[in-house]
Each structure stands twice: as C-alpha cells, then as structure tokens.
Amino acid sequence: NTSDPEILNQVLVNYDQKTKDFFRWTVSYTQEKLARLIEEKTSLHFGEILDLIPLERGKSGRIIRLKVVGSKLTYIFGKELEIRKILSDSHLYSSAFVCDKLDYVDDVPQRFQLVGAGWGHGVGLCQIGAAVMGEKGYKYEQILFHYFKDAMIKKKY
C-alpha cells in the first residue's frame, strides 16, 4: 500500500495512476453505455444487455468464462483479459467482480454495477507491493519468496 508517486510511476501507466483503490472498486454503466461499449469492443450486436453471467471462475475468483445475454444475441467470452477489455473503455482492474442489475424497465435492467476486487490477472504477485519492497531495499529473491512461498530459483544458463 503506497501513495508514493515515484513508486507508482514505475509500475502504473497514466490512466491507472488516477485510481485510488485497487482493493475494492465499483464501476457503473447505463444500459446504453454498456451495450455500446460491448458492441464497439466485439463488433457484435447484442441489442439490449439483459445479463452478464459468470460461468466459470479461476482459483483467484476471477471470471474466466462470461456469458453476455442480449435481446438479440447471447455469446460466451472465454478469456480473463478479453472480459476485462470488453467491459471497459480501457480495461477493468480485474475480472473478480459481481454484477448487480438495477432499475428494471419492462424486464430490462437500465443500470449495471460491477463490484470488484483486486487489480490484474491474479497470478499472485502484486506489482505495487513488489515495487514498494524494492524501494525498501529487499532483494529480488526476497520479493519473489514473499509472494511465492514454495518457489525455487535456479540458474538455467
């Protein structure tokens, strides 16, 4: 956990530096915005978005298969990064989210609220945490073993 701009500049691109909380986050979309966003990102016309259904989650809780149900098309997306890209102008912080559908009109949700946790792919190493540890003088071996307790480092050349 840091707010040090020099450390954050090492690991975050500009738009990520505007984010103040990667641990818990919320993104809200109107029906129109979400339908337009998904169509722009996929070139598929879903019509009105009726539901976002997680079909499978990985060990970290991130969605790795998502069914998008529209009034004209239903499609399953099957990659974590693809899911993050189709549901955001740039990308969601992670695919570890739940979707609340709100403000129904004629059985069609008019608002979608994604409530999420974490940032990144969820493979176990926090880039910000590793950068802070490096700034505090930890060696790369100490940082790796902090995140991957049973890892072994071998010289292969």
Image: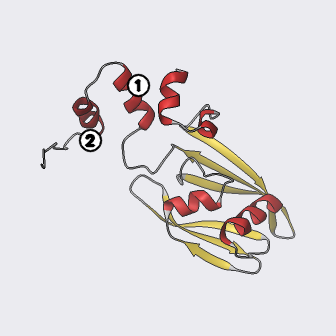
Q: Measuring from the top left, give residue 139's x and y in whole percent.
A: 25, 26
Identity of the residue drawn at 30% across and 19% down: 137
Q: Is residue 131 left or right of residue 103?
A: left
Identity of the residue drawn at 27% across and 37% down: 144
* Residue 103 seen anywhere in this rendered image of the structure: no
Q: Is residue 149 left or right of residue 79?
A: left
| Residue under numbered circle 1 | 132
Q: Is residue 121 left or right of residue 48?
A: left
Circle 2 SS class = loop
In the rendered image, which quarter is residue 124 located in? top left
Circle 1 SS class = helix
Q: Measuring from the top left, give residue 119's x and y in whole percent.
A: 51, 44
Q: Measuring from the top left, give residue 101's x and y in whole percent.
A: 73, 58
Q: Which tag is nearer the camera, tag 2 or tag 1? A: 1
Q: What amino acid is labelled 1 in the image?
A: Val
Q: What amino acid is labelled 2 in the image?
A: Phe
| Residue under numbered circle 2 | 148
Q: Quote the CA–CA distance across marks 2 and 1.
A: 17 Å
* Residue 151 seen anywhere in this rendered image of the structure: yes
Q: Measuring from the top left, give residue 141's x and y in whole percent.
A: 22, 33
